[in-house]
Image (spheres, helix red, strand yellow):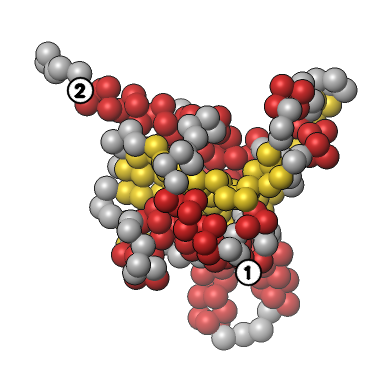
Amino acid sequence: MKEELYDKFLSGINNMKLFMKAMKGALNESSTLSDQLEEKIDELKFHRIPKNMLLTDDYIYYTKKNQFEKASRVEFNVPIDDQKVPVTILKKMFPDSKDLFDSFIMMHLVTFQMQKRLMPTCFIVYNDQKMQFVSFDSSIKTTIYRKLYEIANRIEPDGIIDVLYVGEMYNYVNTKQILELESRERIKYKNSESLVFFKSSRDLTITSYSFDSNKVNDMKYIASTLLRKDNSFNNLAFMKPVINEFKRLNKKNKSPDFS
């Protein structure tokens, strides 16, 4: 039998703190031993770290040197119980946008204009018209693959209908030569950088846009890019788990039930 100990650890720590507080209130006396115990409890760090940051590590393996590199990671976390918010919040922020994806694009273009950098971010849309955002960064791409794979595994049980993604991407001219290099060697050969937006939906529609990072302050360029019909691309490998899961569910729902 497998048990999840992490949640029990958190419950145990909280119960210890409540017990100490109740005991001090009942006795109404100062105790050096009790004060020291409370200090020891407060010094515990792991319960303040998000579970996935504490228990999950990402690595990349370099075949040429037979070497592993561990990711340095950061994740944006909102300290509230319900991580989901109504999709109308984003629509109200950008009332002139034609849909949620358009609002998502404009929101992150404005952010990029101000700080010239973006953490990879996903907006997960549920069938109750609420959404959750997952924003993170890592020194290696493995984290992006894992994050999208985890989201794909939640699509059916959680009722996810759309997955929106934004992130920065390097562009190369000689793709064949670049693919022969290890990932850490490729960056010095980049020709340009792009801000990439991608949307995959339950109805199997795929929409994507790529903006030259050096032109995001040009509103005419942004408008022309959004209007362009040939701007989409479907070959983002890290999105494949999400796309394939939507395809699987679509096929499953169309299959006849002989039960």
Question: Residue 259 location, x and y as percent?
Answer: 12, 15
The residue beneath circle 2 is 254
Q: Nearer the viewer, residue 12 or 197?
A: 197
Number of other residues with Cα within 10 Å of mark 2, as a class: few under 14, some 14 to 19, many 20 or more: few
Residue 111 in the image: above or below residue 146: below
Q: Nearer the viewer, residue 239 or 57?
A: 239
Q: Residue at x 57, y 86 (%)?
A: 28
Q: Residue at x 30, y 28 (%)?
A: 249
Is residue 223 visible in this depiction of the protein? yes
Mark 1 or mark 2: whose residue is earlier in sequence: 1
Query: Would you identify the image quadrant in which residue 213 lies?
Result: bottom right
* Residue positioned most to the left: 259
Is residue 122 visible in this depiction of the protein? no
Residue 96 in the image: above or below residue 234: below
Label 2, secondary structure: give it: helix
| Type of the residue with mark 2 | Lys
Q: Which mark is residue 114?
A: 1
Q: Residue at x 35, y 67 (%)?
A: 96
Question: Residue 148 location, x and y as percent?
Answer: 51, 38
Residue 14 in the image: above or below residue 4: below
Residue 206 in the image: above or below residue 118: above
Q: Is residue 31 left or right of residue 77?
A: right
